[in-house]
Amino acid sequence: MPFWKFIKNQATGDTPESVELRIEGDIVDDGDLWLYEWFGEPATAPNAFKDQLKEFSGQDLTVWIDSYGGSVFAGASIYNALKEHRGKVIVKVDGKAMSAASVIAMAGDEVHMSPVAVMMIHNPLTGAYGDMRDLRKVADILDTVKESIVNAYVTKTGRSADEISSMMDDETWMSANVAVKNGFANSILYQDEPFDVQNMKEFSFSRLEVLNSANQSIRDAIKLFNKPDPVNEQSNDEKEKLLMELDLI
């Protein structure tokens, strides 16, 4: 049983018939799906998904996403299927759209995020073994894969490839507000009035920025302990407290 669900809502006197799709769990390659099904773990794979999607050709589609991501190639295949869909595609992120799942989200004609949802983009990752030639080739392949992912983000956001690449280098986490401001989403769900995105503060989380900040704090602590102890310098207790705050002791 797949862990994506197409839900057909029957027409009523007030609303026309509509189709909803829910994508949950990991985004996996077709050859790996059986393992997730065996253990009853949620996952979405491209081939069966695309076959079922064809049944709703010509109908508008609302796609709900709540996924940590997974295989970049599976994500790209699902992205293409949604882009080729004959009908309007509205994406709604109700929890998380991270990694490959964020690529799928870019397929929406409109992207809306829950106010409590997050989106994360980063560089493609893999494992590798071999000699120096093999590892250099793997790095070149990752560069090519990254370029393909950048294209999806650039198409949606209108931002430059260099800017998107830098955000991926930093592993950038975005709240709904920041995703709208950066062009990854069009609006925030359940808001009566749209935010003034031009005046929003930047609250995206970058692992690299936090690491740099921590490294600077450590360097400052080392300088402090290398100084001679004048009369008015911090007491040893204060220094010990500082190290505890930095998780150094």
Image (tube, helix red, strand yellow):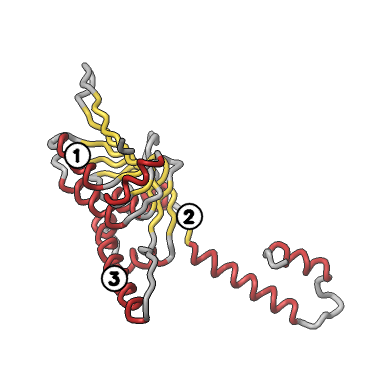
183 in relation to 193, above or below: below
Callout 3 amino acid:
Ile
Q: Is residue 207 left or right of residue 245?
A: left
Q: Quadrant of the N terminus?
A: top left
At a point 38% along the width and 69% down the height, the residue shown is 128
Label whose residue precedes the other's in the sequence (2 or 3): 3
Callout 2 amino acid:
Phe
Which residue in the structure is indicated by mark 2?
Answer: 203
Q: Is residue 156 left or right of residue 196?
A: left
Which residue in the structure is indicated by mark 1?
Answer: 53
Residue 197, given in percent of the width and then of the height, sits at 38, 50
At a point 65% along the width and 72% down the height, the residue shown is 218
Q: Is disc 3 surrounded by few (<14), some (14 to 19) or many (20+) residues within 10 Å?
A: few
| Residue 196 visible (yes or no) | no
Q: Secondary structure at mark 2?
A: loop
For marks 1 and 2, give the one nearer the viewer.
1
At a point 42% along the width and 42% down the height, the residue shown is 95
Specify the quadrant of the image occupied by residue 20.
Answer: top left
Which residue in the structure is indicated by mark 3?
Answer: 141
For marks 2 and 3, give the one nearer the viewer.
3
Q: CA distance from mark 3 to mark 1?
A: 30 Å
